[in-house]
Amino acid sequence: MTEIDLKLYKWYCYQILAILITLLLIYCANHSYLPITNYWIPDSYHYEIAAFNYQKDDIRTYFFNLNGLLYAIGPQTFTIYNTALLLASLYFCKVFSIISDQAVSWARATIVFNPYFLISVTGPTKEINLTFLALLSFFLFFNESNLLKVISFLVAAYACAVRPEFGMIIIIGMASNISLRFIKNPIKHCLYILAVYFIINPIPWFNNYITEISGGEELPFFQISVYHSLALILLEMNKSPILQFAVFIVKLVLGLFAPIARPSTIFSEYVPLLDWGYSFMAMFLFPLNAAFVLLLMSWKRKIFEDMPRNTKIIIIYTFLGVLSTLISPIIQFRYLFPYMPMLGAIYVLQPVKVRNWIIGISSIIIAASFIGSVIWLSKDYERITAYIPLFVSWL
């Protein structure tokens, strides 16, 4: 057995072990053996309801029908299904070997150590499906076989059934293979896309379309967020050709960096598992996001034009994904999670000195944010005795 094979099996073992530990914690929470609450994904509960009651006839029907089939077999089937997707995603991270072996490891780490994925394993989830579909799409697309390239677009089309805009971003990302023949620098490519967005964003039909796919002017699906009032203000400001630039900067900070300032629950009587998971992911993503933003700011580096085309496609796709998260009126940190393997791989493109500076500065900011939240943003969780979803009731 080669060293490469051992490294691959190592990540599989890490993933299975992490899932088993998470299932044990959920079991202890279900039976009140440990003071754990907040141990299932709220959106999974909505997907559970939709699996039995979704009435519309649109592309999302396919995703909810799949969930309905898994429920028909048994709710525990979700754990097997999602575990299989995560393990397959680890394998498909091989696409990042075009960057380096280190990039592959970083990409796998973002999957294995993502608490949101681990808690999501028990039920219907979009993020695990989207991560798998994106990696599978590019794994097939980067193959020499034309048949596999065609299949990659079919996989991306199915991703539209899970989250329509996500599937379209995969398709546009793969289609950038054509435009890269004319714009060889992928960072310039991204900046041109950003410029086009700023030009068309103030146009009413485009702005209204972005608002409508997010639920409408009042953002009803976002009302429980602490950012809801601010999001409504930014929604109006974003219609201005001038103010849209300030809005973009504010949302960039809120979407990529602000989540590290979450209220601290360290002194809470109960351990909010998902809340702790969000805090961990915010800290994990902070340096990766910083590295990506710095990469976009270093567009003059000649190294970009000499990169393999597949690496350029990965950069453009990741930019499109991050941009789609930022321009949405709904400020949702978790929408970045399916792009994390790409952000992890791209992080390695930074020189070692730059990475060391990023880690050092990020560590100081994260530590200061954590201490500040413990002192000024302390939050106490109570045991929630509400209805337990079917997908965790079997544990």
Image: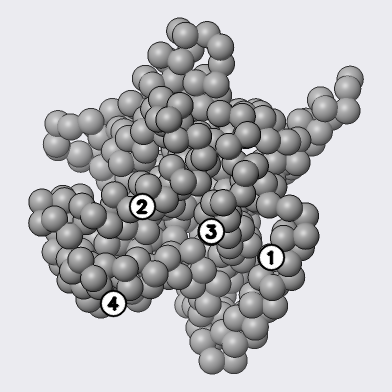
The answer to whether residue 253 is left or right of residue 7 is left
Considering only order in the chain, which callout, 3 or 4, is on the residue closer to the N terminus? 4
Residue denoted by label 3 = 297
**Hey, what amino acid is under mark 2?**
Leu
The alpha-carbon separation of the residues under discs 2 and 3 comes to 13 Å
Label drawn at residue 230: 4
- Helix, strand or loop at mark 1: helix
Residue denoted by label 2 = 194
Q: Residue at point 56% right, 79% down?
A: 265
- The image position of residue 324, as x and y in percent, is 35, 50
**Hey, what amino acid is under mark 3?**
Met
Q: Is 143 situated above or below 374?
A: above
How many other residues sit within 10 Å of disc 1, few (<14), some (14-19) or many (≥20)? some
**Hey, what amino acid is under mark 4?**
Leu
Residue denoted by label 1 = 358
Considering only order in the chain, which callout, 3 or 1, is on the residue closer to the N terminus? 3
Looking at the rendering, which quadrant does residue 387 occupy?
bottom left
| Residue toward you, 132 or 44 | 132
- The image position of residue 230, as x and y in percent, is 28, 77
Q: Is 65 situated above or below 207?
A: above
How many other residues sit within 10 Å of disc 2, few (<14), some (14-19) or many (≥20)? some
- The image position of residue 101, as x and y in percent, is 75, 35
Marks 2 and 3 close (CB-CB < 8 Å): no
How many other residues sit within 10 Å of disc 3, few (<14), some (14-19) or many (≥20)? few
The alpha-carbon separation of the residues under discs 4 and 1 comes to 29 Å
- The image position of residue 9, as x and y in percent, is 78, 30
